[in-house]
Amino acid sequence: MNQDSEPEPEAARRDADAAESSRASRGWWDRNADEYQREHGGFLGDDRFVWGPEGLDEEEAGLLGPAERLAGRSVLEVGAGAAQCSRWLAARGARPVALDISHRQLRHALRIDGAAPAFPLVQADAGALPFADGSFDLACSAYGALPFVADPVRVLREVRRVLRPGGRWVFSVTHPVRWAFPDEPGTEGLTVTASYFDRTPYVEQDERGRAVYVEHHRTLGDRVRDLTAAGFRLVDLVEPEWPEWNRQEWGGWSPLRGRLIPGTAIFVCERDRRH
């Protein structure tokens, strides 16, 4: 390490509240958006709707409903990054809004389009959505926001608030069982080394102890209880299997691990019809 380089963050398992988690997420994604898009942009595509590293595509899965019925429907994408999913939705006649906490991530949406996209880009925290009640028919999030927030019920209640009664909400996160295994793509990632029931957040912190990256763990049961507490009904829980065509490694995701343990959990939910 040369003298001008910054020290590597220290990894720890410790508590991190909502304010610290939000601050860390905004900073981390602003700093790392360029590298993330360089590394994963080819797999994600410019206008493809991918639910996770396995490569399950909304074109195939239809978790938001049949593609031919998306036309004219208003859709909120939470944690949109470079808005690839929103771009796919817009191409099918939907009216998406792409929201992300990171300004730099949204700048990549402008880079892909070469100018302002054909839908709004909104920088905001998912725990305080800047939209009126009942603004959207659908909402979606592919690994956006929920893994990084300390109070997921707050985010879920905000999504419920901006959905119309009966609106569908679909989101993907790291499969909770993965928290019991090392985040490694090889054989070292196949042995349980931690308790699945330990909800202590994973934190990377600087030399002053300030969080620069925070990720929160919820068990499957926690996720279901969070959804019902926020006024959603769970319609389906999808655990994508690793396809034969996918040979890539992405962090701890790999063909080796993907054939043995799930890597992604996708929750398909509907807002209750109460006003």
Image (cartoon, rainbow, N blue to C red):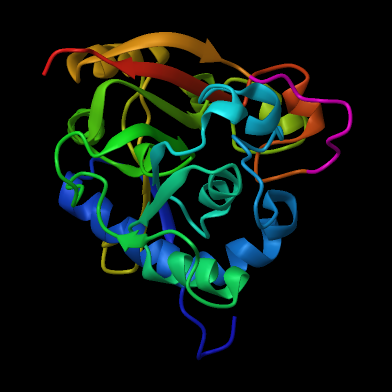
Residue in the picture at 62% in, 26% down: 263
Does 150 sit above or below residue 110? above
Does 51 sit above or below residue 234? below
Res 234 → quadrant: top left
Front-most of residues 36 and 58: 58
Residue that protrudes farthest toward the left in the picture: 275
Magenta range is 240-248
Front-most of residues 218 and 198: 218
Residue in the picture at 26% in, 68% down: 208
Q: Is residue 196 visible?
A: no
Residue in the picture at 73% in, 50% down: 43
Determine whether, in the image, residue 49 is placed left or right of residue 102: right
Front-most of residues 17 and 93: 93
Determine whether, in the image, residue 14 is placed left or right of residue 109: left
Q: Is residue 137 visible?
A: yes
Q: Residue 121: x percent and y percent?
A: 38, 62
Give the number of callouts: 0
Determine whether, in the image, residue 207 is placed left or right of residue 52: left
Determine whether, in the image, residue 7 is placed left or right of residue 120: right
Q: Residue 261: x percent and y percent?
A: 67, 18
Q: Quadrant of the N terminus?
A: bottom right
Q: Quadrant of the C terminus?
A: top left
Q: Residue 129: x percent and y percent?
A: 21, 47
Res 157 → quadrant: top left
Residue in the picture at 62% in, 63% down: 37
Residue that protrudes farthest toward the front in the picture: 72
Res 152 → quadrant: top left
Q: Main secondary structure of the magenta part?
A: loop
Q: Residue 21: x percent and y percent?
A: 26, 50
Does 168 sit above or below residue 79? above
Q: Is residue 186 magenta?
A: no
